[in-house]
Amino acid sequence: MISAKLSSKFQLAIPKAIRDQLDLKAGQQFTLIAKGNIIELVPVRSLTEARGNFKNCNPNDYRDHQDRI
């Protein structure tokens, strides 16, 4: 498990192993999502980079329409 320490300025440094694995670049933007006691950092990707990610997905019957009753 890789860990990081929150600085006195509330900053985190992402370890090199993770930066390399996810191909993160300096100045890249992230979306932060709080889920209970967990913070997710989701890299913001351009539409060009995201192209093809959902190539084999079937959009039919994706949504459960019962949630709007």
Image (tube, grey):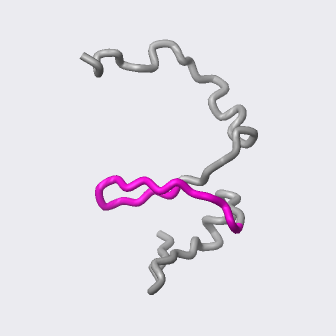
Looking at the picture, how far across and down is residue 14, in whole percent? 58, 71
Q: Quadrant of residue 64?
A: top left
Viewer-closest of 58 and 8:
8
> With respect to residue 15, does 46 lie above or below?
above
Is 37 within the magenta? Answer: yes
- 10 displayed left or right of 28: left
Name the residue located 47 percent from the left edge and 74 percent from the top edge.
Answer: 3
User: Which residue is drawn at the image coordinates 59% and 54% (left, top)?
Assistant: 43
Judge left or right: residue 2 versus residue 19. Answer: left
Residue 69 relative to residue 54: left or right: left
Q: Main secondary structure of the magenta part?
A: strand
Residue 17 at x, y percent in the picture: 63, 69
Q: Residue at x 54, y 53 (%)?
A: 42
Rendered-image quadrant of the C terminus: top left
Which one is in front, 12 or 23?
A: 12
Residue 66 in percent (x, y) is at: 29, 16
Q: Which residue range is magenta in the image?
A: 26-41
- Above-or-below relation of 54 to 9: above
Rendered location of residue 7, percent (x, y): 47, 83
Single out the residue that lies furthest toward the left. 69
Question: What is the quadrant of residue 39 in the picture?
Answer: bottom left
Compared to residue 8, the image places residue 21 above or below, namely above
Residue located farthest toward the right when viewing the structure as drawn:
48
